[in-house]
Image: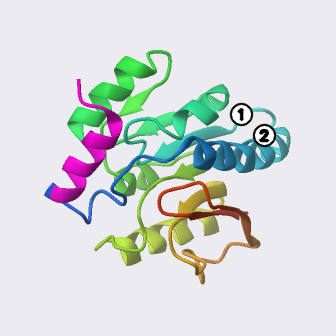
Amino acid sequence: MLADSHRFLRNFIRNPHATGAVAPATHALSRSVAAAAQEVYARHRAADDGRLQVLELGAGTGALTHGITRLQPVLVERDMGWARLLRHRFPTLEVREQCASEALGQLEAPAGIVSSIPLLNNPQSSDLKRLIADRYAAGLIRFFVLYTYGWKDPLAGSGFRTARRASFVARSFPPAHVWLYE
């Protein structure tokens, strides 16, 4: 079985626009994303009478999933091989083999989102941002946590009431920023 770093590099070489990094998220990045997600999840779950579902978009090999498992996220991954790997690694979690746009478009109840979808080099970035903004405006996205390797707010202008850089993770390759939107 290939190590996760080899999986990422292979997929990045095959299709750099579909794989946002040359390596999976580091443990430090996973912990930082998990801390932001758990903080905001607790607040919104209480407001939604405990029924708030969490979706992890672009779950990849599960590097972030380890940190948010206790939130019982639904894992969304369009790559068939990675979806199979996620089912093996996280047998108690639901894994949907579909693209993030489809998963967001199918939201029918409020959800919190944790995303590994690359917005810097993704050719569908503007469509994804528009869909995220629409779902937020419709009250279906309560919070959105993502990380980026860029310096700017990746969802600027998407209509979120608040947007803040939750952390900077120097122990990531490359260094990353974790953003939290509500």
Q: Is residue 124 inside the magenta stretch? A: no
Q: Residue at x 37, y 50 (%)?
A: 23
User: Label 1, label 2: how many angstroms apart (C-alpha)?
Assistant: 6 Å
Quadrant where the N terminus sits is top left
Q: Position of residue 140 (x, y in %)?
A: 61, 55
Q: Is residue 162 above or below residue 6?
A: below
Highlighted magenta segment, given as a residue range: 1-13
Give the class, few, some or many, for how many residues have Cα within 10 Å of label 1's Cα (few <14, many ≥20): few
Q: Position of residue 106 (x, y in %)?
A: 43, 49
Quadrant where the C terminus sits is bottom right
- SS state under label 1: loop
Q: Residue at x 60, y 81 (%)?
A: 156
- SS state under label 2: helix
**In the rendered image, which residue does mark 1 sit on?**
51
Q: Main secondary structure of the magenta part?
A: helix
Res 163 seen here: yes
**In the rendered image, which residue does mark 2 sit on?**
45
User: Do residues under tags 1 and 2 come within 8 Å of each other at their CB atoms?
Assistant: yes
Q: Which mark is residue 69?
A: none
